[in-house]
Image (cartoon, rainbow, N blue to C red):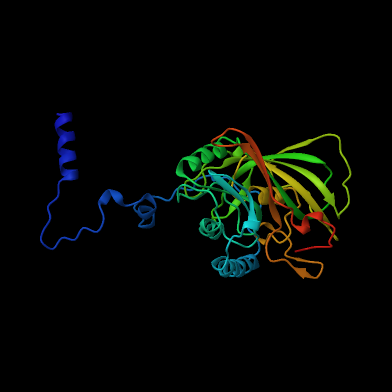
């Protein structure tokens, strides 16, 4: 009797008749949980989402970012690579020095015009840089090589270094490693989360992922920094106490990201109290000593790996921008 009742229930659930005037707009079971909650068919559940370490940036940052995006779109539409931009090339891949304020897609689309040696037209970006980040960008010349490099990046077999110019208090460390969580907040922006939050679900269904970066101080106000013997390690638990009060210092750091999370270095600089100059999205100063900075100052300095085809070790370096000296003589 129980089996017969179950079969009857299933038959009634999945059996319905259609008249000539019936309009099917969406299968019943395609209605999402959120839609049912909105129709008050289900109670809204308040999940205990992890909280990001920092509050969103001030509203003015959206206006600044929109202005920068429009200007970058205009510049990118007219951009063309030249042979002077090429850092390395062989029959399998090419490395170029991406300029600041240019979208990666524009770099890729202009690559075929300058490539010397290629037996295919299968060009791919092996790594991506933010719009205002300059430096080493890899372009592969076949699907096969692209797949190998994606695997190498995923397995952290490719080592990268970056240079950033930050505004903040002089660090009380020479070298530091920071470990934290990384994910999107309910506002859709990337944020730092506590290390203990790694694995927890976020609004929208994604998860907090691990993020680790090592930093070295290169200079403070254009001078060699004070040396500290002990390497520091920070495991993020909550909001840091380090803040700049009064006239801040110009701090140039070299960053070595272990993971490859979106905006990783920018987020960790913010956490360390030395946000990158011009990085309004992460509380960086865009007006400094009488000048306005159109974009953050972050440069992909080097990339080292085993060649995806030959296996030979290669190191690719991009020339440093003049602001990397940190002495204020060049702020371009």
Residue 147 located left or right of residue 170: left
Residue 298: image x %, image y %?
70, 54
Q: Quadrant of the C terminus?
A: bottom right
Whether residue 324 is visible, yes or no, is yes
Q: Image check: 64 left or right of 186? A: right
Residue under the point 14% across and 32% down: 4
- Of 185 and 74, the residue lying toward us: 74
Please give left or right for residue 209 compared with residue 16 in the image.
Answer: right
- The reply, left or right, for residue 8 in relation to residue 149 is left
Q: Is residue 153 above or below residue 272?
A: above
Q: Position of residue 79 (x, y in %)?
A: 58, 65
Residue 151 vertical placement versus 241 (above, below): above
Q: Is residue 298 above or below residue 210?
A: below
Residue 221 figure quarter: bottom right
Quarter containing the N terminus = top left
In this rendering, the count of numbered labels is: 0
Outermost residue on the left side: it is: 20
Q: Is residue 254 above or below residue 189?
A: above
What residue appears at the point 47 percent right and 45 percent down from the top-left corner?
142
Residue occupying the point 76% across, 40% down: 176
Q: Quadrant of residue 65?
A: bottom right
Q: Foreground residue, 157 or 1?
A: 157
Q: Position of residue 74 (x, y in %)?
A: 57, 70
Determine the image quadrant of residue 91: top right
**Residue 55 visible here:** no
Q: Position of residue 231 (x, y in %)?
A: 80, 35
């Amino acid at each position: 009797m129980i089996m017969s009742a179950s079969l009857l229930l299933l038959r009634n659930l999945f059996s319905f008749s259609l008249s000539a005037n019936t309009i099917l707009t969406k299968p019943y079971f395609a209605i999402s949980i959120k839609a049912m909650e909105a129709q008050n068919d289900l109670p809204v559940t308040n999940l205990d989402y992890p909280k990001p370490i920092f509050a969103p940036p001030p509203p003015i940052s959206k206006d600044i970012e929109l202005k920068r995006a429009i200007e970058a779109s205009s510049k990118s539409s007219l951009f063309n690579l030249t042979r002077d931009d090429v850092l390395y090339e062989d029959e399998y891949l090419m490395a170029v020095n991406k300029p600041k304020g240019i979208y990666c897609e524009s770099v890729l689309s202009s690559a075929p015009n300058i490539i010397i040696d290629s037996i295919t037209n299968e060009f791919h970006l092996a790594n991506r840089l933010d719009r205002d980040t300059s430096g080493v960008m890899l372009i592969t010349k076949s699907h096969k090589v692209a797949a190998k490099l994606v695997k190498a990046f995923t397995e952290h077999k490719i080592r990268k270094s970056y240079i950033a110019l930050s505004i903040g208090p002089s660090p009380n460390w020479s070298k530091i490693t920071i470990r934290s969580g990384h994910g999107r907040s309910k506002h859709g922006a990337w944020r730092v989360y506590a290390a203990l939050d790694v694995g927890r679900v976020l609004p929208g269904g994604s998860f907090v992922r691990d993020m680790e970066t090592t930093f070295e101080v290169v200079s403070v106000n254009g001078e060699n920094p004070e040396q500290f013997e002990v390497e520091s390690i920070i495991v993020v638990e909550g909001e840091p106490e380090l803040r700049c009060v009064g006239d801040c210092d110009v701090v140039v750091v070299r960053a070595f990201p272990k993971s490859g999370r979106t905006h990783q270095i920018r987020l960790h600089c913010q956490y360390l109290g030395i946000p990158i100059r011009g990085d309004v999205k992460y509380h960086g100063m865009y007006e400094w000593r009488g000048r306005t900075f159109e974009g953050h100052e972050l440069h992909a300095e080097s990339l080292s790996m085993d060649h995806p085809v030959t296996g030979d070790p290669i190191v690719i370096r991009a020339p440093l921008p003049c602001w990397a000296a940190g002495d204020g003589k060049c702020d371009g």
